[in-house]
Amino acid sequence: RRVHSLHHKSYNPTAFSGTSMHPVESTAYYSACLLAVPLGAHPCIVVGCLVDCAVGAWLGHDGFQWPGSGDYFHQLHHTHFDCNFGAMHVPIDRWLGTFAGCSADVGKMWRGSGTAPEGAAAEGKESEGVAGGSGAGAAGLRARS
């Protein structure tokens, strides 16, 4: 938690936020590519994995809505911290009740529990950091032409 919290200092992330992480997290993130070495993978596979890790992190935080990227859902994760933990195409957030399709969904998750975290949308209203003028959210995400 302490290690990944550095990455979450980016409430409204940019492409560079994708690789802005604690040295311990960065080491774990990129060393995962080395798991292919004992399996006899060609060095190009390892390099390709490293490039994919970096480019994927940049594209996942750049604020553009790429086809199939789920960038908006990750923007909500950075704004609220308590939703959309997994990848867009992996249904674990739906199974665990932490999926938020919009900022209003974050408020619905916490409404009535009396433990709404700071930044959770109240009464279904959009919170200012997500669809307000800050550049994130459905209205604020820049569309790629």
Image (spheres, rainbow, N blue to C red):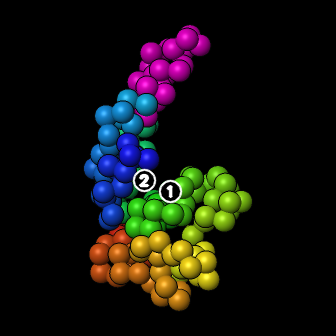
Q: Is residue 48 magenta?
A: yes
Q: Quickly name the residue at label 1.
A: 69
Residue at point 32% right, 65% down?
12
Q: Are marks 2 and 1 in contact (CB under 8 Å)?
A: yes
Q: Quadrant of residue 75?
A: bottom left
Residue at point 62% right, 83% down?
112
Q: Quadrant of the C terminus?
A: bottom left
Task: Locate residue 13, reporting x and y percent.
Answer: 32, 59
User: Which amino acid type is marked by label 2?
Assistant: Gly
Q: Quickly name the residue at label 2.
A: 60
Q: Quadrant of residue 140?
A: bottom left
37 or 83: nearer the eye? 83
Task: Locate residue 9, reporting x and y percent.
Answer: 30, 57
Task: Locate residue 79, reporting x and y percent.
Answer: 40, 67
User: Which amino acid type is marked by label 1?
Assistant: Ser
- Label 1 Cα neighbours within 10 Å, binned few <14 / some 14-19 / many ≥20: some
Whether residue 107 sits left or right of residue 81 in the image: it is: right
- Outermost residue toward the front in this view: 114
Inspect this view and state whether residue 143 appears: no
- Which element type, helix, strand or loop, lies under badge 2? helix
Residue at point 58% right, 76% down?
110
Main secondary structure of the magenta stretch? helix
Residue at point 38% right, 29% down?
27
Q: Looking at the image, is mark 2 or mark 1 earlier in the sequence?
A: 2
- Which element type, helix, strand or loop, lies under badge 1? loop
